[in-house]
Amino acid sequence: MPKSNPAGQHLIRYGIAADQKYLLGEFLDTYDQLVINASMVAHQPAALAMFITQRSKNKHYFIDPQTHAFQQEIGNLQSTSTNSYGEIKKSIRTLIERYGSPIKKQILVNKQSIFPEDFSEDKTRRGFCRRVINYQCEAISSHAQESDAAPYYEFLEEEGVSDFGLFAPSVVIAPYFYMDSLTLDDWLDVNIDCASDSVGIVNKKGYTLCIQIVISKDVLFDKSQVKQLVKAYSKIKASAFLIWIDAFDEADVSESLLGSYINFIKGIKRSGVPVISLYGGYFSVLLMHQGLLDGVTHSLEYGEQRSVTPVGGGIPVAKYYLPCLHKRLQFRDALRAIRALGVVNKKAFFKNICGCAQCRKLITSGKAINDFTENYGRTKFIKGRQYPTPETKDNSVRHYMWCKSKEYKPRSINKLVEQLRDTSKNDKLKRAVGLENFAHCEKWVKVLKGIE
């Protein structure tokens, strides 16, 4: 039987194989569950099966089926490498083959993206939903059964200690598609139909169903469209709603948009179903402590917001997550903040900047700024460009993971808001890092104080 646990409050999105060292060992117990993109499962099924079943000790997980990807301009699905330029990426092709019609016909045969009308036939749509759900249920467990460790698992099963069902996802997600203010009327019915079809399929399989809602920021500004969404999804019998707002940077968006975000969550939550953010930062974590959100997802260091349409990553720079601002800063800005806060030794650093396990390991001398620079600011030049060293990146990610672990621990929302208010009044810090890195604190306080 599949696991029946809910999604959990602290979710981390698995990125690439190199991320594993930040999800195991000392970090294994700092989060509740992993979210794994279906394309990554298709790319490395055996390696992920071994990671889940052996290295992470059967850590709870679920798979994002990424069905929205097939709406996008087909170029986003094609390889850009020299040897396979213009061909559908291998992992994406694997998903297309498993998901079948109508995606397979439109993309592989007709070389075009899917449209709402491709799901108009009930039989076609239900078959698609069944295959998408089956893939989530079987992708990891089937490879676990085929792995070198399979005899060991079979032995445990015979002894009544374990069973292959432990390797199944904790929840499954109905097929979903992205909606903006212009396409909502076209895609909403398809989303609701897929959700409704999935309810029956999942109930028969004994799994827990979550419904993913992916929308643009402009939808939040349209009260009639928000009302339309809430009304439609409130009729679906789901165990949780997973929300993803396209490119929603909580520190950069306006107070008005943050308020609209809250109203949307309230509307969805009126059905009594938990609501989980699939990409969220500290503001969403505060909404979780407020009782509005039931969980928040992030990835390693940088994944607190994401665009629906893939964008280039740019040149990596050394960044440090400053706990009092709850934001990653370029190293030079973080260094100015430390100086502005009067940090001269490790005791002051642990009190005023960060006392996480990684910082306590690295900030060891009487000259805290020197230790900080050495461990979080070292770079190297490659072809005339400056990049953080592997050690700098490793230290930064470990520091970030410890900071996030602390933020998720149960605490008084009133106390957290007051701490944020105190930060927003620190003029020295503001002048050190600049308004672009500071203004979100006061904005968040205003919005949170306005919640009834």
Image (tube, rainbow, N blue to C red):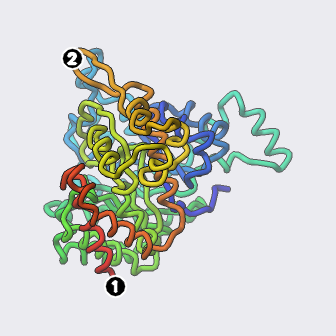
N-terminal-most mark, 1 or 2: 2
Residue 170 position by quadrant:
bottom right
SS at mark 2? loop
Quadrant of the snapshot with the N terminus: bottom right
Q: In which quarter of the image is residue 2?
A: bottom right
* 390 in relation to 419, above or below: above
Count residues near mark 2 (Cα–Cα under 10 Å), then give few for <14, some for 14-19, many for 20+.
few
Residue 110 visible in image: no
The residue singled out by tag 1 in the image is 452
User: What percent of the width, then of the height, locates residue 73?
Assistant: 19, 41
Residue 287 x/y as whole percent: 39, 69
- Whether residue 323 is visible to the viewer of this picture, yes or no, is yes
Q: Position of residue 331 (x, y in %)?
A: 31, 38
- Residue named by callout 2: 384
Answer left or right for 418 relative to 83. right
Give the residue displayed 34% in from the left and 84% down from the top.
452
Choose between 303 and 158: the one closer to the eye. 303
Q: Is residue 166 shown left or right of residue 83? A: right
Residue extending farthest to the bottom is 452
Q: What residue type is labelled 2?
A: Gly
Instruction: Identify the disc placed on residue 8.
Output: none
Name the residue located 52 percent from the left edge and 41 percent from the top edge.
Answer: 358
Q: Which residue lies furthest to the left in this view?
A: 182
The correct choice, above or below, for 27 with respect to 145 in the image is below
Q: Is residue 83 above or below residue 369?
A: above
Q: Which residue is drawn at 50% across and 48% down?
A: 347
Near mark 1 (Cα within 10 A), the count class, few <14, some 14-19 or many ≥20, is few
For mark 1, give the secondary structure.
loop
x%, y% of residue 281? Answer: 36, 56
**Camera-nearest residue between 435 and 258:** 435
Q: Hey, what amino acid is under mark 1?
A: Glu
